[in-house]
Amino acid sequence: MKNSALITGSYGGLGTCFVNIHAATGGDLILVGRSQSKLDAQAAEVAAKYGVEAVTIAVDLSQPEAAQTIYDTCKANGWNPDIIINNAGFGGQGDFARERTMEQDLSMIAVNVEAPTRILKLFLPDMIARGSGKVLNVSSTAAAMPGPLQAVYYATKAYVTSWSNALWRELEGTGVTVTALMPGAMRTGFAASGDLGDTKLFANAVDPTAVAQAGYDGMLAGRLNVTSGLPGWQRPMMALAPLFPKKTMLNFVYDQQVAGSANK
């Protein structure tokens, strides 16, 4: 495979954008997701459209053995990804103690935190040995603050950004870089799956295509963080977020995520 990219969550929302962007450069693809039929359809489509090689690995990233399965499959087939995009992740609205179930939140931690950690624990040594590699970890602007009514999701993204930034420094001089992409609210399946579609937070959600391109370009450039997809009023707010009184910020975020608030 040439200039190959391993992309998790490849057939939904932002993942589809990453797949098309990379394929358009002539790069081959290792598509990772839960549904074999959806992976097969996506692989056939991009191979026909862009003339690239597209292979698939069907795994459930909420399971602890998923990362090892991905790595072992790549090694067995001689697939050595030049790029890894840890895109798979999900959120979910609700009160932590009274509405969210144990399974929902632990599965979220497994997919958003454990899976990308395991994947890079396995693949980074190979990239370092080759002296080259690019990683893009999809975080969120949610990483910059606590998120009442999405308490666990915001915390997982704080982990992703902090961890990615630490790796960026640890890898300095190796030829390998790690970039964190921090998108705002986007028009993907994320809002619907997380019961967030009728919240103020997603009232001005943006198209994910430009966000994916910004993240991909930032990754190739080896940037530390890429923030993209924020409506005009949110940009200065993000910059000033650390300066706001914590309780004021918590109240604001809570209000943005109350179900039905989009129409108020």
Image (cartoon, rainbow, N blue to C red):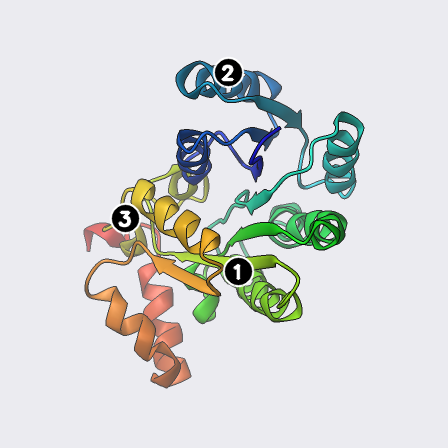
Local secondary structure at mark 3 = loop
Q: Disc 1 and disc 3: Cα gap in Å?
A: 18 Å
Residue 217 to residue 47: above or below: below
Task: Tell how many labels.
Answer: 3
Question: Is residue 100 something that shows in the picture?
Answer: no
Q: Disc 2 and disc 1: Cα gap in Å?
A: 30 Å
Q: Position of residue 195 (x, y in %)?
A: 41, 44
Look at 38% across and 66% down and name the residue there: 254
Residue that label 3 marks = 205
For label 3, count other residues whose C-alpha is less than 10 Å away and answer few (under 14), some (14-19) or many (20+): some
For label 2, count other residues whose C-alpha is less than 10 Å away and answer few (under 14), some (14-19) or many (20+): few
What's the amino acid at mark 3? Answer: Ala
What's the amino acid at mark 1? Answer: Lys
Residue that label 1 marks = 157
Which quadrant is home to the C terminus?
A: bottom left
Residue 128 to residue 19: above or below: below
Residue 134 to residue 18: above or below: below
Left or right: where 47 falls relative to 252: right
Which quadrant is home to the N terminus?
A: top right
